């Protein structure tokens, strides 16, 4: 059912982008580079550090409805990782678990610019923004406990959904080029990112099944405007 809703949302996103009513809008295409990390049982609170962060890269497409609102789609890949040995707590030392997970993530978001913004418009060349949307991601963790690989609750659950939101800032760096930076939080609806079983032998608690995993990406996006600014000023408020 979740996948059907996701598929319908993607079709709706594509339909809006191809509508003749939007023909005078502008589109952008570019790349994204940044850093991703996981939040969950194996990393409950650390946002910065070489032990938790991983390289994140992909492509970005933005459809500007006007100077306040945009639709954005990104496709990215990263390898999430975390380990108990990086947490100074007796339970984590006893569990001694770690994981790596190659994640491919498709995101569809709507952006709201706090200030009027358009590439190539000198009067409106900068704005902070907020975005919100949904993600479909492919996840297949490799999890170790005391050096031995374990199978968590991820069988037949490699494709999952998440909800994303966060702040960002964008500015012009040329007549047709925009540079953005954003910090995006992905809240999953499951506990499968780390592949950690919640219990072993139905007795020893390894994780918390109510503690859904997150993954976070902080990205720079460099995009190029493919189309000209719309001729009708009513859409550029």
Image (cartoon, rainbow, N blue to C red):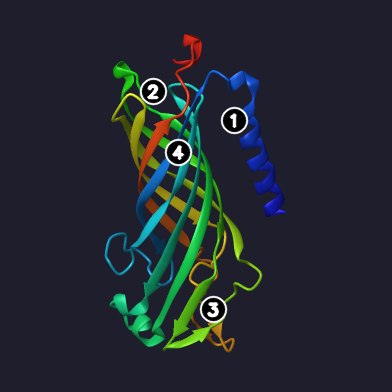
Sort mark 4 into few (<14), some (14-19) or many (20+) by Cα contacts within 10 Å.
many
Q: Residue at 34% across / 84% down in the picture? A: 93
- Counting from the top left corner in percent of width and height, residue 202 is at 59, 86
x and y, in percent, of residue 220 in the image: 34, 45
Write down the quadrant of residue 94 in the picture. Answer: bottom left
For numbered disc 2, what is the local secondary structure? Answer: loop
The spot of residue 60 in percent (x, y) is 46, 42
Left or right: residue 19 versus residue 35 is right
Relative to 57, is 85 on the left or the right?
Answer: left
Q: Are marks 1 and 2 in contact (CB under 8 Å)?
A: no
Q: Rounded to the nearest whole Å, what is the CA distance between mark 2 and mark 3?
A: 48 Å
Measured in 3D between alpha carbons, the distance from the residue under mark 2 to the one under mark 4, in whole angstroms, is 17 Å
Badge 3 element: loop
Q: Is residue 206 left or right of residue 127?
A: right
Marks 1 and 3, how far apart in space? 41 Å
Q: Tell me if label 2 and label 4 are in contact, CB under 8 Å.
A: no
**Callouts 2 and 3 close, C-beta under 8 Å:** no
Per the rendering, the mark at residue 17 is: 1
What's the CA distance linking mark 1 and mark 4? 17 Å
User: How far from the left and from the top, in percent, is residue 5?
Assistant: 69, 47
N-terminal-most mark, 1 or 4: 1
CA distance for labels 3 and 4: 33 Å
Could you say which is closer to the camera, residue 228 or residue 16? 228
- Sequence order check: which comes first, mark 3 or mark 4? 4
Q: Which residue is mark 2?
A: 118
State which quadrant residue 173 falls in.
top left
- Say which residue appears at 52% left-offset and 47% top-offset: 107
Q: Earlier in the sequence, mark 1 or mark 2?
A: 1
Q: Which mark is residue 169?
A: none
For label 4, the residue is: 131
Mark nearer the N terminus (1 vs 3): 1
């Amino acid at each position: 059912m979740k996948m059907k809703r996701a598929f319908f949302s993607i079709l709706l996103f594509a339909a809006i982008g191809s509508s003749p009513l939007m023909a005078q809008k502008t589109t952008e295409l570019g790349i994204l580079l940044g850093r991703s990390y996981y939040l969950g049982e194996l990393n409950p609170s650390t946002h910065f550090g070489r032990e938790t962060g991983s390289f994140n890269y992909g492509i970005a497409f933005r459809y500007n409805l006007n100077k306040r609102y945009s639709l954005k789609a990104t496709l990215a890949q990263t390898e999430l990782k975390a380990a108990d040995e990086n947490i100074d707590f007796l339970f984590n030392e006893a569990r001694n678990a770690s994981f790596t997970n190659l994640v491919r993530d498709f995101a569809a978001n709507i952006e709201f610019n706090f200030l009027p913004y358009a590439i190539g418009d000198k009067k409106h060349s900068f704005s902070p923004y907020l975005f919100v949307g949904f993600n479909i991601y492919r996840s297949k963790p490799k999890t170790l406990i005391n050096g031995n690989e374990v199978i968590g609750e991820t069988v037949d659950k490699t494709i999952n959904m998440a909800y994303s939101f966060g702040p960002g800032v964008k500015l012009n760096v040329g007549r047709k080029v925009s540079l953005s930076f954003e910090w995006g939080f992905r809240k999953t609806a499951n506990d499968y990112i780390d592949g950690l079983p919640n219990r072993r032998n139905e007795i020893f608690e390894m994780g918390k099944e109510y503690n859904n995993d997150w993954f976070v990406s902080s990205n720079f996006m460099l995009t190029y405007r493919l189309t000209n600014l719309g001729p009708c000023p009513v859409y550029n408020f």
